[in-house]
Amino acid sequence: MLIKPSEDLSEHAAAADVTIVGSGPLGLIAGMDLSRRGLSVLILESGTSDKSTTAQDFADADLSTPDTHYIPSITSERRFGGGGHLWGGRCVPFDAIDFAERPWLNMDAWPIGPDELEPYLARACEMLGAGRPVFEREIPGCAPKDSSFSVNQLERWSNKPRIDLLHASLLNETPNLKIALGCTVTRLFSDAKGKVTSVGLHGAVPNKQIPVRQLILAAGGNATASLLLNEQDRDPQLFGGQGGPLGRFYMGHVNGQIADIVVQNDDLHRALDFFLDGNDSYARHRFTPSEATQRTHHLPNLAFWPVVPPIREHAHKSGALSALFLALASKTIGRRVIAEPIRLKHVGQPPYQRSRHVMNVLRDPISLIQFLPKFLWHRYVAKYRVPGFFLTNPGARYGLEFHAEHLPDPDSRLTLSDRRDAAGLRRLAIDFRFSDIDAEGVIHAHQMLDEWLRAENLGHLVYRSGDLRAAVHAEVMHGNHQIGTIRMGHTPKDGVVDQWGTTFDFSNLHVASTAVFPTSSQATPTLAGAQFTLRLTDHLVQSGKV
């Protein structure tokens, strides 16, 4: 339940078995799981229920790589619900190979294996509103002989990506789960025994310092890294020291489109759209290389899926696609429908040729009439929320989206700038890098997929450019998946947290964030982040720490 801003926090803080910083999906999942077990939980949220320029200003940062990273103000949300306001709802589990040593990519094994997260998969799907954990389905009539690639892997989608709305009743009615808004955590105070004893707060709150017993940082990858970097700035020995892993290996995903796919198999063509498979959420098929293919041909982990032609290109002549473009090109409408980074990915940067799209709508009203009512119903009214739009065409030609892991690079990193925010903290400085090695892996995978599609008589690829490396670099832009900067390691030399997410420096300071992942996978990280968070809360209870 929400605490009134005028309430004295000290009493709630003193009673809390666990204090959580951040009310995004992972913070809320941690809070709900711990309170379900009978523990007293206090969640501290920097923002309020509504979007606030004052709170959002804390997300501002110095960006030295604007060609590869979205402006920081649109990659995080400082309000109740946090990153849930930006999350599209895609749920994909990490693969076994993500946890393994991969010498061809210069990657060490994770401190944990896939079996450590597997027991929490069903619960994570449930708490994210993504139905049952079914992530594989054969396509009737489409059975490739060569297993180098698969068309059977699925991604699932949350029916309500706003976790604060999905679990609104539980959050409002659980007496031992308290949520305080407008409380920005600025300091971690510790004792000589290696425990955090209290946190400092900034905001219109009566208390500027409150006690903690167990503290979970779930404020989002970059916000949590910022807090820890500022602590390290005060005490350079913390978190591996100035030359240690904190802030390094900043990863997102290598994604975009450099080719079209032409589908020749009718059964495969019919299976490309979003569909309900009887497991309580929408799903979609993906093209994925097998683990053996990745090992044999030294590929990164990645996935592909067909998408509609770029809606910003009026040459598609589709009234329905042009209507979608016109809606998303409007900031007022578009930002209400999807997160700003995704909106920009669809429409690009202005100026826009709106008149050409208006002509498409006027020339092709039938496709719009056939598409729009059905889409709006299944998007906003139906029990299961369709996550996006896909329109088949007689030529069976589509854009081919690639989504690859971003290889860890110690020089892709977060540091602190000399500018300070309203609370006096040094702001982040972001240097986010993609390499030619990232591009080469994506290109090699495209070439292998094309060969496989042709050999299986399933289809073929048509590249959009002769310079594929330049094409990959022109496509990639990220910052919404904040991975790697608080990495999990075996020792303080190679990690900030241990296998459970507990910092090496403070035995009661834990991190629930995708920033602890040593590699980024082909999968979007929210589902794995939820699994890791549930594993952490389970560990706190089972170990007797709470």
Image (cartoon, helix red, strand yellow):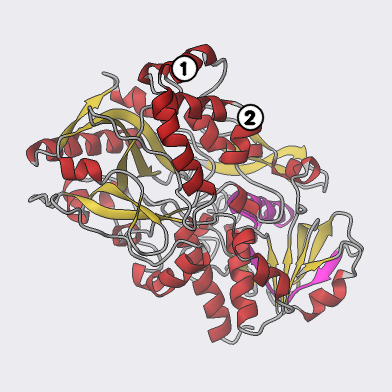
Identify which amino acid the numbered label 1 is placed on.
Leu
**Image quarter of residue 422:** top right
Pick the quarter of the image with the C terminus: bottom right
At label 1, counting other C-alpha atoms closer than 10 Å, the crowd grade (few under 14, some 14-19, many 20 or more) is some
Q: Secondary structure at mark 1?
A: helix
**Image quarter of residue 458:** top left
357 vs 150: above or below: above
Magenta-span inclusion, residue 222: yes
- For image coordinates 71% across by 42% down, the residue present is 427
Q: Which residue is tagged 1?
A: 362
Residue 330 at least partly seen = yes
**Image quarter of residue 95:** bottom left
From the top left corner, tell me how far across and down residue 134 is, in percent: 33, 64
Nearer the observer: mark 1 or 2; the answer is 1
Task: Specify the segment rendered in magenta.
Answer: 209-236
Q: Nearer the viewer, residue 186 or 38?
A: 38
- In the shown orientation, is residue 544 left or right of residue 78? left
Q: Which residue is tagged 2?
A: 331
Identify which amino acid the numbered label 2 is placed on.
Lys
